Image: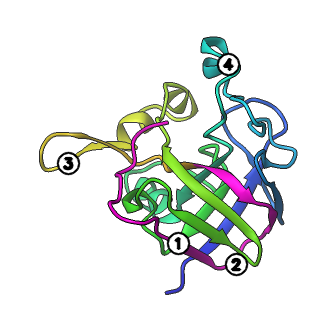
């Protein structure tokens, strides 16, 4: 299966979930046009409180649709946009990508993966028990964050459901994703 965009979402206000859209426009160096998290510097409220001048490495949030299916199998009801993602993908192991991977979305847009989303307590306010469901342990007991990846927009463009997604890996040695 060719990796593709399953859904796109945005929210003009700081909240937990985002509303699905027929398309979103990615703006180079900023993020999703009209989304509360777009900007050159941090927009997530907790990070603004720490240092409002730090660069925004979380301009775009991507989650794999397979996570929503995994959560449904555990009894959760999670639809596109519910976890605050801007782009829902299918057929691509987002969590297995190295830092610096460039994701080509549709015909123009390019997002560089900066790291893993670190889910916060708000996720349990959305649905109790969901935080534990998006965290896991690897074979060595290390924490696994399954709530998607974050990125910055290198090249702008319109992204729509059904658009292809192509991953361009950075030069080796690859650096594993860490939380951002």
Color theme of the render: rainbow
x then y, percent, for residue 54:
64, 25
Q: Which quarter of the picture shows residue 96?
A: bottom left
Query: Please, which residue is most extreme toward the left here?
Result: 140
Q: Which quarter of the picture shows residue 179?
A: top left
> In the drawing, what numbered circle is on residue 162?
2
Upstream in the sequence, badge 2 or badge 4?
Answer: 4
Callout 2 secondary element = loop
For disc 4, the marked residue is: 48
Callout 1 secondary element = strand
Closer to the camera, 40 or 173? 173
Q: Nearer the viewer, mark 2 or mark 4?
A: 4
Callout 3 secondary element = loop
User: What range of the chain is rendered magenta?
Assistant: 151-180
Q: Is residue 133 visible?
A: yes
Q: Which quarter of the picture shows residue 3?
A: bottom right
x then y, percent, for residue 11:
80, 42
Q: Nearer the viewer, mark 4 or mark 3?
A: 4
For disc 3, the marked residue is: 138
Upstream in the sequence, badge 4 or badge 1?
Answer: 4
For disc 1, the marked residue is: 167
Q: What is the spatial separation of the Cα atoms under label 1 and label 2, in whole angstroms?
A: 16 Å
Q: Nearer the viewer, mark 3 or mark 1?
A: 1
Residue at 70% across / 57% down in the picture? 154
* Predominant secondary structure, magenta span: loop
Residue at 50% across / 36% down in the picture? 180
């Amino acid at each position: 299966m060719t990796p593709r965009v399953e859904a796109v979402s945005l929210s003009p206000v700081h909240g937990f979930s985002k509303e699905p859209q027929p398309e979103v426009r990615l703006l180079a160096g900023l993020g999703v046009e009209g989304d509360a998290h777009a900007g050159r510097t941090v927009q997530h409220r907790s990070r603004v409180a720490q240092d409002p001048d730090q660069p925004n490495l979380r301009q775009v949030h991507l989650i794999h649709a397979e996570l929503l299916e995994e959560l449904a199998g555990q009894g959760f009801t999670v639809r596109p946009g519910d976890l605050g993602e801007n782009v829902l993908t299918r057929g691509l192991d987002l969590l297995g990508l190295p830092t610096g991977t460039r994701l080509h979305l549709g015909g123009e847009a390019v997002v560089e993966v900066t790291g893993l989303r670190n889910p916060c307590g708000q996720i349990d306010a959305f649905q109790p028990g969901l935080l534990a469901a998006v965290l896991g342990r690897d074979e060595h007991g290390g924490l696994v964050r399954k709530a998607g990846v974050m990125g910055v927009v290198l090249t702008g463009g319109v992204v729509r459901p059904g658009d292809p997604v192509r991953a361009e890996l950075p030069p080796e040695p690859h650096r594993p994703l860490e939380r951002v």
